[in-house]
């Protein structure tokens, strides 16, 4: 029963954080809203006994990715308020319609095939510990793991190459 | 009593909020952050179905880990691109990036 209370509280916090993120005027507030959402999602993982995924969520999202976002937001200027006057007419109503329509389509499609069957939430205490996840990761999914290594290497090389590339005006570069 | 339905509802709500952010934000950094919310919503569904099915191979949790790794790589490359755009144009407003239009 306590799981339902924890879920309700943190679901409200997660959705509120996401809303602050998408409609906040100041980019720093948006970053803080995203941080709140990411922490709430880590709580959801703990609630589902996926402890390792929760730890990875906190370390990577709330730690590394949010630091990167805040760094870039500070770097390219927080004082520039985003003006919300739309240059494209009807963009905002269409965006609201698309978002609400997508949620409605998901719920309609889901209500035609509500999942039934056994439900095992919160009974298996050992589920999601590092041992079983590592066993699956380095056993069944070794090839995908190695592919991820290639992906991260290629991304790092691409990032460094892009940072070193200097456009036509080399005298302006430091 | 936790059921799978409430995780699906939460995932759908977060995904839709992220989609709204992608469609309306004009700061390119915040468009990227909205994409992160959409990826996290997908992760909630993956972990919920993994717990629901009690899959012996832990496919859902492993897939969620891969999605997190992919999101980290995407943020790195995306922010490098945004910084390049900022160096060239001194603005990251996506409405002004119409170089390849027509």
Image (cartoon, coloured by chain):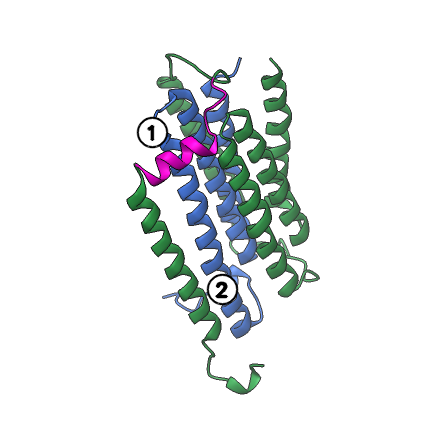
Chain colours: A green, B blue
Q: Look at the image and tell me whether residue A127 can be seen.
A: yes
| Figure check: A10 above or below B69 | above
Where residue A125 sits in the image (x, y, percent)?
50, 20
Callout 2: helix, strand or loop? Answer: helix
| Figure check: A133 above or below A89 | above
Q: Label 2: how many residues lie within 10 Å, few (<14), some (14-19) or many (20+)?
A: some
Where residue B27 sits in the image (x, y, percent)?
57, 57
Q: Name the residue under label 2.
A: B80
For this view, does A48 lie left or right of residue A15? left
Where residue B102 sits in the image (x, y, percent)?
36, 66
Return the residue nearer the eye: A61 or A107.
A61
Tag 2–tag 1 contact (CB < 8 Å): no
Where residue A169 sits in the image (x, y, percent)?
50, 84
Task: Report the disc number at residue B46.
Answer: none
Q: What's the CA distance linking mark 2 and mark 1?
A: 36 Å
Q: Name the residue under label 1.
A: B57
Callout 1: helix, strand or loop? Answer: loop
Q: Label 1: how many residues lie within 10 Å, few (<14), some (14-19) or many (20+)?
A: some
Q: What stretch is highlighted in magenta?
A: A124-139
Q: Look at the image and tell me whether residue A91 can be seen.
A: no
Task: Tell me what residue is drawn at x 28 percent, y 45 percent.
Answer: A143
State which quarter of the image contains the C terminus of chain A: bottom right
């Amino acid at each position: 029963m306590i799981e339902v209370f924890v879920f309700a509280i943190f679901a409200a916090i997660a959705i509120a954080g996401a809303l602050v993120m998408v409609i906040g005027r100041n980019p720093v507030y948006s970053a803080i809203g995203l941080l709140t959402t990411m922490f709430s999602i880590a709580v959801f993982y703990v609630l589902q006994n996926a402890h390792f995924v929760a730890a990875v969520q906190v370390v990577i999202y709330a730690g590394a990715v949010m630091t990167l976002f805040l760094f870039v937001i500070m770097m390219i200027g927080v004082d520039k308020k985003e003006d919300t006057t739309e240059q494209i007419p009807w963009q905002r109503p269409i965006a609201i319609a698309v978002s609400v329509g997508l949620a409605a389509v998901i719920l309609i499609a889901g209500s035609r095939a509500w999942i039934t069957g056994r439900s095992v939430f919160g009974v298996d205490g050992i589920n999601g510990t590092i041992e079983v996840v590592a066993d699956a990761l380095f056993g069944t999914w070794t090839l995908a793991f190695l592919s991820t290594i290639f992906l991260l290497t290629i991304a790092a090389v691409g990032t460094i190459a892009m940072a070193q590339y200097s456009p036509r005006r080399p005298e302006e570069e430091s | 009593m936790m059921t799978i339905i409430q995780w699906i509802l939460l995932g759908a709500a977060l995904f839709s909020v992220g989609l709204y952010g992608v469609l309306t934000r004009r700061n390119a950094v915040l468009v990227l952050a909205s994409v992160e919310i959409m990826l996290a919503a997908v992760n909630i569904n993956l972990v919920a179905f993994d717990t629901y099915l009690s899959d012996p191979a832990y496919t859902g949790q492993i897939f969620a880990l891969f999605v997190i790794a992919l999101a980290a790589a995407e943020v790195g490359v995306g922010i490098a691109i945004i910084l390049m755009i900022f160096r060239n144009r001194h603005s990251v407003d996506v409405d002004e990036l119409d170089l390849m239009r027509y």
